[in-house]
Image (tube, grey):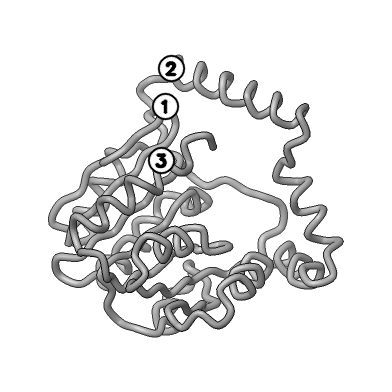
Amino acid sequence: MPDREERFRVMLDMLEATVGPEPRVLDLACGTGSITARLLQRFPKATSAGVDLDPALLTIARGYFAGDERVTFVTADLKDPAWTAALPHTSYDAVLTATALHWLHSEPLAVLYGQIAALVRDGGVFMNADHMKDQSTPRINAAERAHRHDGMERARTAGALDWADWWALAAEDPVLAEPTAERFRIYGEHAEGDTPSARWHAETLRTAGFAEARPVWASPSDALVLALK
């Protein structure tokens, strides 16, 4: 994703604008802790709780942040109705997530948004940067997808690892081999959920209990939606 750092920059700009430079953050579907790393680099007095189910990615995250008292990680399944019980706090200034929730279909994602709304304090924010497709523009979507995949193929030809190659290496790593095997027992092969439009996300977040919600950044295929409690 050539615009990856740009979306993180906007996310952190809006975090500072809405809740200040010392937030308590929930890094939702945190993976290896990409958001948390950038959060703490920019805001050293912030704290972060990362939640994910993937044992391989959590192994990487826990190793990278070992000894940092500002960071905790929790193993939980976001499709489990009781997942919030595993969190270290019941209220957060901000819940942040990026390129993660597209594996959920719309109905369970709407349920999750209601749970997130209950975790965000009054005046706090939720931000989701992810694939958000406008189904009303099929030709634009097709052109964007073809161009993006051409770029991905050029990168692979130049030696970049794709998703399958990365996981193949993880399966051979002495530290990651066991959690990687467990990861595939949990998830199976990579599966996509829905990718509804940014408008759908904003409307669903308002229905879930947020006072305001709208996109604050967009690329041809993705968007960052901010919801203010």
Mark 3 or 2: the one toward you: 3
Q: CA distance from mark 2 to mark 1?
A: 9 Å
In this rendered view, identify the residue nearer to me: 132 or 226.
226
Q: CA distance from mark 3 to mark 2?
A: 22 Å
Residue 16, position as x, y percentages in the image: 24, 58
Provide the secondary structure element on which disc 1 rests.
loop
| Occupied quadrant, residue 27 | bottom left
57 horizontally vs 131: left or right: right
Label 3 vs label 1: CA separation? Answer: 13 Å
What's under tag 1, amino acid-wise?
Answer: Pro
Give the labeled residue for mark 2. 140
Mark 2 or mark 1, which is nearer to you? 1
Eyeballing the image, is 102 above or below 19? above
Q: Where residue 199 appears, x then y in whole percent?
A: 27, 38
The reply, left or right, for residue 62 in relation to residue 41 is: right
For the residues labelled 2 and 1, say whether their Cβ atoms are less than 8 Å apart: yes
| Mark 1, residue position | 220
**Residue at the spot x=76%, y=54% of the render?**
167
Residue under numbered circle 3: 6
86 sits left or right of 187 in the view: left
Residue drawn at point x = 40 percent, y = 56 percent: 109
Kind of element beneath mark 3: helix
55 in relation to 184, above or below: below
* Amino acid type of the residue tagged 3 in the rendering: Glu
